Each structure stands twice: as structure tokens, then as C-alpha cells.
Amino acid sequence: MRLRYLEAGSGRVVVFVPGWCMPGRIFASQIEALSRRWRVVALDPRGQGDSEVPRAGYEPTRRGQDIRDLLTHLGGGRVVLAGWSLGVLDALSYADMAGDARLAGLVLIDNSVGEGVPPPPRASRFFQNLRQRRDATVRGFVAGMYRTPQDSAYLDGIAREAQRMPVEASIRLLSYPRPREFWRDSLYAVRRPVYYAVTPRLRGQAELVAQKHPQPVVEVFDGAGHALFVDAAARFNASMEDFLARRAAWA
């Protein structure tokens, strides 16, 4: 199958992996800002954006392999790999599979990394709602990713693109068969610099990563929504520039 990616700029490479059902173009601000100095790549994972929509492969091993295939396609040299939301788990799946030899750094944006005490289970109708009234459910999910006002046409486009894959495939993406310790151990097996950018709900995990990882950068984005790189684009881009220029292990 064919995977599509966006690309801009030249030089050392940073690869962005979007979250659940999202297109790579959601990183438009990062592509524009960072490509002035870096080669920026934003992946459309399988079934997302303009990539093909296969019947299978919506599980962490295959998604990690897709990232490895992309890095092979991009050529040699280290990269900074940045995953947001579900893309955090896909990036950690890649790291578990391939190690950190190709990584100059790892950027994890607003998802759990399996640290600390697990949250108490709570009942949810999200899967049922996806099956029964998918469009309204996805539109509500997309609107809830932001704290700052967004253009209605932009939100409509993201919500439409988020419904390209079959609904059962989208549910499988939210049901990865891995214990939370898998993500934690995959993170700490990466010895390259790590930048963990989170909203306040993950502050506790960020503090533990700051204590336990040998080369951590952690940042809490108060007042931003889940798509913090959109809500606080200038701040996030500045942090990325600093991480790429001063912390990443390119040598």
C-alpha cells in the first residue's frame, strides 16, 4: 500500500506523526515555521489523510513498521521523531521495534506514556457513539481538541478527513493490545534526548519522566487543548527549535 507524507525544507530531518484518524497537515504551523531551517516531514498514517485505506494494519506493530519504512525511504542519518496523541504510541512502537539508532531525539506530545498510577476505569459510550452516529461524534471530538477559536471550515475539513477509514478500524486504533508498562519501558529504552510536551492532565507523568529519563525536556502547556501545537503554536515551535538545535543528538 502507499503512504503519503508532506515535506518541506532541507537539512536535518524531523518527522511528525499525527494522532487518531488525523491527517499530517494538522502540523501546518510546524511545517511552515520549522522548514526554514530543517527538513520537516508529516506522515499521513495508513487510513489517514491522503494515504491509502487498507483493510488491516491498524495495530501498533504494523504502525511502527510503517514509520520504519518511512525512515528507510527518507534515507540515512538520524531524525527527530515527533508523535502526537496516538502518534506517541506509534512512535514508541517504532522505538520498541527498531531501537534508537536512527533517532537524534524523540518528541512525545500529549499522551500517556504509561508512567505513574493508572487512572481509575470509567464507563464510556465513545465506541458505541462512533458506531451509531459517527459524524456527530467525530465532529465533537475534533472541536474538543482545541481551546482557542478555530475556523469552521478548518474544523469541518479535519472532521471529514477523520472519517476516511472504516469505523471498526478507527475503533481498533483506540484498542491497542499492549499493557501500559509496554509504553513506559519503550520510552526508557530510548537513551536519546526526549521532549515530552503535555497539557495539565499529564503533569504527573511529565514530572516522573523528568526524574527518570537521562536526557529529558518536559513542558506543561497550561491553557492549551489536546492539539497544543495549534493552540500554542508559537510557544511549541520555539521549544521545538530549541530542542532540535541544542538538545537533539545529531552526531
Image (cartoon, rainbow, N blue to C red):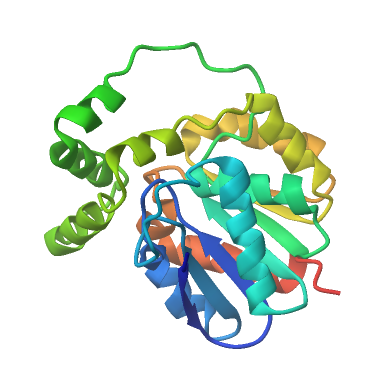
233 left or right, relative to 16:
left
For the residue pair 227 and 3, the one nearer the viewer reads as 3
**Residue 208 appears in the figure:** no
Please give the name of the residue rendered at 81% of the width and 67% of the height, measured from the top-left corner.
249
The front one of 74 and 251 is 74
Q: Would you say 186 lies left or right of 157 here?
A: right
Q: Nearer the viewer, residue 142 or 194?
A: 142
Give the image location of residue 156, x and y in percent.
16, 57
> Considering the image in quadrants, where does the C terminus appear?
bottom right
107 shown above or below 51: above
Query: In the rendered view, does 156 fall on the left or right side of 190?
Result: left
Judge whether 41 appears above or below 96 on screen. Answer: below
Depth check, front residue: 223 or 26: 26
> Which picture quadrant has residue 37?
bottom right
Query: What residue sits 64% from the left and 65% below the top?
Result: 69
**Residue 165 location in percent, x, y?**
31, 49
Residue drawn at x 26%, y 40% as measured from the top left = 141
Residue 122, placed above or below residue 73 = above
Residue 144 screen position, x and y as percent: 27, 41
Q: Does residue 143 appear in the picture of this structure?
A: yes
- Say above or below: 171 vs 239: above
